[in-house]
Image (spheres, grey):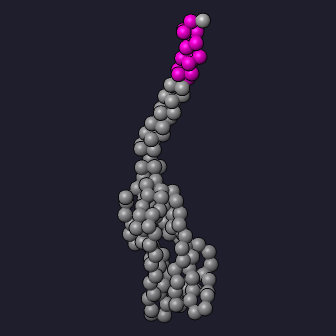
Amino acid sequence: MTGRDDDAPHRIAEHASFVLSALVVAAVVGCLLYFAVAPEYAAPPRMVIEQDGAVRRAGDQWYVAFEIRNQGGRPADGVRVEATLSTEGQVERATQEFDYVAGSDRRRGAFVFDHDPAHGELELRVVSLRVP
């Protein structure tokens, strides 16, 4: 036997691993390029806030559950949301802050009030956010 015959299986394995590695690298580069230019991933954060379920009473306080959704493709941090309850000439405000909301993600929380939101006007809004 010559050295050439012994090297044939090694060469086939080397070529196969090279082709497989090249395909993996090409797939990773393709995914990165797609995420960089696809409009749904490049869109700036767009926050939507909605009440999530019924108002719940616990003791002398009322809890208003809510959900925020980032309908944009890019993440946001420092997302600050506020609820304003106007009842009988009084205005009550509650705020929450979320450290990070990924693109197309959602977060839940609750605002706590001293007055029943059913007897007033409740407004939920996103106050501010930062784009990292």
- Between 105 and 125, the residue placed more toward the observer is 105
Query: Majority secondary structure of the magenta segment?
Result: helix
Q: Which residues are magenta?
A: 2-16
* 78 shown above or below 8: below
Residue 45 falls within the magenta-colored stretch? no
At 43% from the left and 55% from the top, the residue drawn is: 74
**Which image quarter is the N terminus in?**
top right
Task: Answer whether residue 59 is visible to the viewer in this image.
Answer: yes
**Which quadrant of the figure has residue 97?**
bottom left
At 37% from the left and 58% from the top, the residue drawn is: 132
- The percent coordinates of residue 25 (x first, y second) are 47, 33
Task: Answer whether residue 30 is visible to the viewer in this image.
Answer: no
Residue 5 falls within the magenta-colored stretch? yes
- Between 9 and 28, the residue placed more toward the observer is 9
Taking the image as shown, residue 19 lies to the left or right of residue 53, namely left
At 58% from the left and 9% from the top, the residue drawn is: 5
- Between 56 and 31, the residue placed more toward the observer is 31
At 45% from the left and 63% from the top, the residue drawn is: 100
* 15 shown above or below 76: above
- The percent coordinates of residue 7 (x first, y second) are 55, 14
